[in-house]
Amino acid sequence: MNYKEIGKQLDIAALEKEAVAQISLSKSITVEEAYTIQYENIQRRVDRGEEIIGIKMGFTSKAKMEQMGVHDMIWGRLTDDMYYKNGDRLDISKFIHPRAEPELCFLVSKTIDRAIGIEEVGDFIEAVAPAIEIIDSRYMNFKFSLEDVIADNCSSSAFVVGNWESLNRDIKNLEVELLFDGETMQKGNTIDILGDPYASIVAASRLTHQYGFDIIEGSYIMAGAATPASYIKKGIHLQASVMGLGQVELNVP
Ligand code: OOG
Ligand code: MG
């Protein structure tokens, strides 16, 4: 199988905002092969000058797995081109059929180059912030298998991070909300992220290590959404709030 060629097709789908058919409809690929395609896909961005600044976890909550019909955790790469500052404008015409989800983002204080235990999280993570992820599947109708979505870098397309708070607090039972124009679209709780968002960091360390990738000091880890995602549209003010951590927002003019 030509992993480079499939990675290229997915990258071009994102660049040209033209959805493509799911890979799994014509070929059977393994999870390992899907990660190789993801690597080739993102390598094209790196070759264009983008920098990898973090990773994202996906399907770390039941709500997300059920919405998308998949059954396992996934991880993808985040680049500087996907990063937005709190309050930025998001140009929706850059995407195919974008959805937003409320998340937590972690800041890595020490490079994670092995599978760590939950009791070690404080040694590797210095801060947490409320965040929003914009996902935009490059597949038609936002439909995919687990392998398809891994190859497509887990639908990553943009993310915005709010104010950092030091990690010396309990983040296990915080209400999370996604709002459009001040109206609640999704509501959840951080406990729905694997029972404890720290478990997402543990899973991130295990999975990235398995695929030979380190999570570098200073980079971000998006924990995965506690709620389903909502389609966004032109003209809205997008906001996420996490109890005790504050709010983060984007304008979608
Ligand atoms: C895949 C990405 C999943 C999450 O937070 O669970 C994800 C998708 O739903 O398109 O980002
Ligand atoms: Mg997400």
Image (cartoon, rainbow, N blue to C red):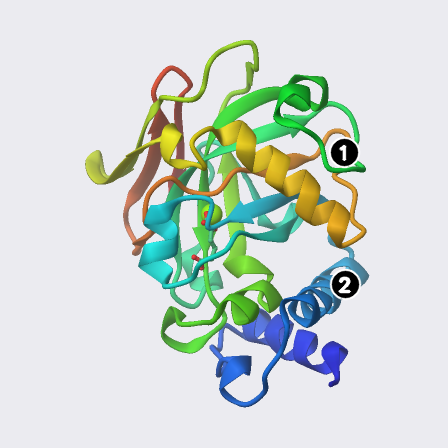
* Apparent side of residue 62 relative to residue 144 in the rendered image (left or right): left
Question: Disc number at residue 43?
Answer: 2
* Apparent side of residue 3 relative to residue 238 in the rendered image (left or right): right
Mark 2 vs 1: CB contact within 8 A: no
Coordinates of residue 249 in the picture (x, y in percent):
39, 34
Q: Where is 64 relative to 126, above or below?
A: below
Please state which of the two labelled residues, at mark 2 or mark 1, is closer to the viewer: 1
Q: Find numbered disc 2 in the image and state the secondary structure of the residue it sits on.
A: helix
Q: Residues within 10 Å of mark 1 (few under 14, many from 20)?
A: many
Camera-nearest residue between 87 and 243: 243
Residue at image x 36%, y 74%? Answer: 141
Is label 2's Cβ within 8 Å of ligand 1?
A: no
Alpha-carbon span between mark 2 and mark 1:
21 Å
Question: Disc number at residue 112?
Answer: 1
Q: Is residue 242 visible?
A: yes
State the count of labels: 2
Coordinates of residue 160 in the picture (x, y in percent):
50, 38
| Quarter occupied by residue 156 | bottom right
Coordinates of residue 164 in the picture (x, y in percent):
55, 20
Residue at image x 73%, y 37%? Answer: 115
Q: Find numbered disc 1 in the image and state the secondary structure of the residue it sits on.
A: loop
Is label 1's Cβ within 8 Å of ligand 2?
A: no
Task: Choose the circle earlier in sequence order: 2 or 1.
Answer: 2
| Quarter of the N terminus within the rendering | bottom right
